[in-house]
């Protein structure tokens, strides 16, 4: 099937290539600034734009490359804020201009993902889409692709599918998905199970039980579904949001697009796909997977992702150290960083801010950002 | 008594003012780079040139001001290396040009102080001189002046006199002076005692005994004597050095000065006043004093000298901190320094180097400087 070009502006490039049905489309919601990676990440320089895990490519570029093993840039949409559009366009020159969907303001994953699904559905009614955060890391790409393929098969059975990550620790900062033993798809070792429930960040004792049970998986907001399935479910569970999105999609190819999206978006409440759809929907499946995933959530975690020396120091930059262990040093300035007798410390050196913290307090970096906002030091936050 | 002007070059200014005999002259040996205060202090930017304890004045300027309460700039000599002459001349514009005595290369305190004594003695045969390091801090100036006055009175009795500091901890990094109970001068509460012996850096157990004994004092190389007494003692104890110094002084006011000092200095072995004179001389006295002294020897010590916040942080610069205690933060760059959950850490932020260390390892900063020299990174050392 050849999809005809239907737009008369730059967005026409969306369909420059012929695509087959049922096609797999990818959506990358590129939101969030990653305040826990301050001072490297800033409001104007969010985590996904930074080369964190690899030296030459940003997390966004890594995400796109991972996806493009399965579907081309022409079938990849990035949903982002207007402040980051230029940077994203430059980091991903392969992506057609019309595939950058700009949100007037952040309203959570609900509006962003449902808008993307509706735009794809309009072009390709049989499309299956996968949504993957722009700022996560995956080290085992074959395992990732295997899980996505199984998820696509479950999506073809009209399920809303998530990829659920095998927990490696009793993490209290993530959401969990409980699976049943009912198999939806068994795909040569990769299995989609019926999902029983989604649980928000649990207390430690509960997280420990989840870890031991073997039935709970981390929710990393990786969703795979037919666009038509999602839109049908949204009609029941989030009807107001779907109406709003349809108002936008109806005028997408007209001069009214910008005015309409600004007006409609302004009135939208914040919502997430997890709470608005996944926690309430009936046919939800989860594909357990062990793909070397990380949300690159804080300095401690980033330190674990990059190469370490023999005493556990993770270093980017020019350092001289004496008896320093298990520390993370990240310098962007080219200055020498000298360390003596430290353990479990994080040092981050940027042009206008220097941060030194106990590595065990990595989660508290957002307190610094909060304090800077309180002090109206917006140039630094 | 009016001392006649006897020189026909710039050094003539030395005697621009009339002086009375016995006059008190001050000598400031300005040597040593203070590697333990790296990265603030460097070979080209030694400790004494830096505003460390006070924000507006360097340690050298503080030292000069302290001395000038007792004798004018015209009777103050600074002995320094050629690399620092310009900076010293600018920091101390009050000092006559001829009072800056430039060593061709460092040879220890022996040559520097005996040369200064010989130059003063030549101009003022009855002079009493005091020698005070350029990079120490004294907070109790009245107590300092009282001790110097008592030392001058003991010097008039032909003693070589030191000011010995009441120990406040069992420091193993300093030399000690043991006093006897024999009083040389009792000057209304300030007393010069006969000194029994000088001891180099003792082991901890010995230092503890010294602290308890009440008879041991820290040697901070503050010496007061008649120039004539020192030169007589040197004639016996360091005759080769005295001969060499006299060769220089003999041609000081002639065009041969520069050639001679370079030639003579080159051949001199390193020596110190402590080992060469004080440890061996007969009539040595010590004035115990409690003057709020510090050698500003390392970052830990400097942190104790500057103002502290309510949780013991000593800060110079723009910082935002969360639950950080007893730390020293020094930023010269204007950048924000953000800290979380640290205790007993030192952070020093300069344009080309950043240092973060365990505060208890302050003595080991010289290891970094040594490592930089080993790596031939001389621009940083």
Image: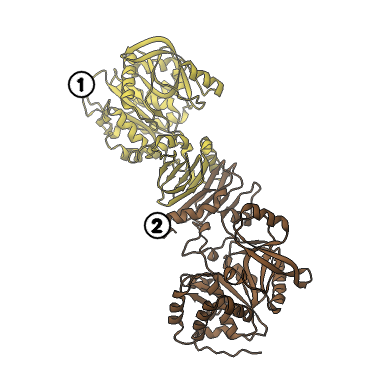
Chain colours: A brown, B yellow
* Residue A89 image position (x, y, % from top left): 52, 74
Q: On the picture, is B144 further left or further right than A216?
A: left
Numbered disc 2: secondary structure: loop
Residue A378 in view (yes/no): yes
Between A49 and B374, the one lying in front of the other is A49
* Residue B273 image position (x, y, % from top left): 44, 22
Between A67 and B94, the one lying in front of the other is A67
Q: Quadrant of residue A123?
A: bottom right
Between A201 and A237, the one lying in front of the other is A237
Pointer 1 with pointer 2, Cβ within 8 A: no
Label 1 vs label 2: CA separation?
65 Å
Residue B253 in view (yes/no): no
Vertical comparison of A276 with B246: above or below: below
Name the residue beneath numbered marker 1: B2
Q: What is the quadrant of the C terminus of chain A in the image?
A: bottom left
* Residue A58 image position (x, y, % from top left): 57, 65
Name the residue beneath numbered marker 2: A377
Vertical comparison of B126 with A210: above or below: above
- Chain holding disc 2: A
* Residue A187 image position (x, y, % from top left): 77, 72
Vertical comparison of A34 with A272: above or below: above
- Chain holding disc 1: B
Residue depicted at 57% across the width and 89% down the height? A5
């Amino acid at each position: 099937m050849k999809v005809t070009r239907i737009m008369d502006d730059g967005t026409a490039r969306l369909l420059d290539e012929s695509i087959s049905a049922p096609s797999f489309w990818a959506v990358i919601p590129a939101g969030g600034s990653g305040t826990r990676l301050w001072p490297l990440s800033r409001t104007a320089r969010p985590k996904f734009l930074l080369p964190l895990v690899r030296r030459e490519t940003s997390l966004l570029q890594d995400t796109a490359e991972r996806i493009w093993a399965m579907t081309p840039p022409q079938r990849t949409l990035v949903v982002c804020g207007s402040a980051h559009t230029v940077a994203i366009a430059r980091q991903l020159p392969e992506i057609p201009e019309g595939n950058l969907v700009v949100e007037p303001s952040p309203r959570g994953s609900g509006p962003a993902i449902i808008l993307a699904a509706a735009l794809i559905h309009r072009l390709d009614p049989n499309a299956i889409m996968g949504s993957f955060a722009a700022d996560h890391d995956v080290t085992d790409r074959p395992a990732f692709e295997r899980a996505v393929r199984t998820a696509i098969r479950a999506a073809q059975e009209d399920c809303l599918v998530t990829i659920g990550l095998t927990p490696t620790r009793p993490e209290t900062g993530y959401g969990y998905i409980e699976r049943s033993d009912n198999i939806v798809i068994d795909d040569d070792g990769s299995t989609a199970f019926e999902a029983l429930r989604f649980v928000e960040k649990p207390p430690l004792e509960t997280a420990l039980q989840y870890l031991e049970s073997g039935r709970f998986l981390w929710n990393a907001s990786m969703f795979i579904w037919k666009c038509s399935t999602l839109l049908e479910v949204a009609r029941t569970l989030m009807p107001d949001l779907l109406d709003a999105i349809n108002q936008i999609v109806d005028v997408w190819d007209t001069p009214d697009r910008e005015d309409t999206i600004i007006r409609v978006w302004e009135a939208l409440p914040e919502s997430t796909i997890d709470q608005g759809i996944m926690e309430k929907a009936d046919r939800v499946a989860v594909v357990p997977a062990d793909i070397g995933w990380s949300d690159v959530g804080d300095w401690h975690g980033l330190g674990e992702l990059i190469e370490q020396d023999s005493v556990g120091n993770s270093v980017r930059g020019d350092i001289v150290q004496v008896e320093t262990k298990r520390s993370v040093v990240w310098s962007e300035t080219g200055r020498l960083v000298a360390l003596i007798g430290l353990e479990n410390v994080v040092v981050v050196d940027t042009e206008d801010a220097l941060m030194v913290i106990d590595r065990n307090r990595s989660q508290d970096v957002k307190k610094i950002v909060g304090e800077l906002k309180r002090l109206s030091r917006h140039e630094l936050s």
